[in-house]
Amino acid sequence: MQRIKKGDTVEVIAGKEIGERGEVIEVLPKQNRVVVSGINIMKRHEKAKQVGNQQIPAQIVEFEAPIHLSNVMLVCPHTNQRTRVGFRYENGRKVRYSKKSGKAID
């Protein structure tokens, strides 16, 4: 079970966008990275291309680049503060809980 999942709200704790919050769009567990909406915006230049009968012009595309897991921290939905994540068993199921409030996250 992962500490941060898709749909969680996280806060950036290190890097150029420290203090910013956003929702997790994608988790890349093998690379230990997450993609957060509105955070770590990069630009990519794309060539003009031909698709069928349609000509697509050259353009600059903005996208969210992955950020390392160690640079983000989960925001507790109960207290709206960033918190560490713990695991415990409730009714035979493993659940994530907020270390700050002690309440289950899921």
Image: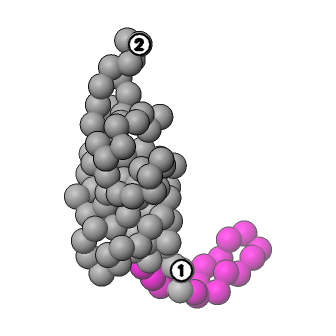
Residue 6 shown left or right of residue 17 in the figure = right
Whole-number angstrom distance, CA of label 1 to CA of label 2: 47 Å
- Secondary structure at badge 2 equals loop
Amino acid type at image mark 1: Val
Where is residue 58? Give x, y as percent: 58, 87
Image coords of residue 67 (percent x, y): 32, 64
Q: Which residues are magenta?
A: 42-59
Picture residue at 37% right of the left edge, 12% below the top: 92
Of marks 1 and 2, which one's residue comes earlier in the chain? Answer: 1
Does residue 14 show up magenta in the picture? no
Res. 69 mark: none
Q: Nearer the viewer, residue 34 or 53?
A: 34
Question: Tag 1, which secondary structure?
Answer: strand
Residue 105 in sight from this viewpoint: yes
Say which amino acid is labelled 2: Asn
The residue indicated by pointer 2 is: 91
Q: Which residue is mark 1?
A: 61
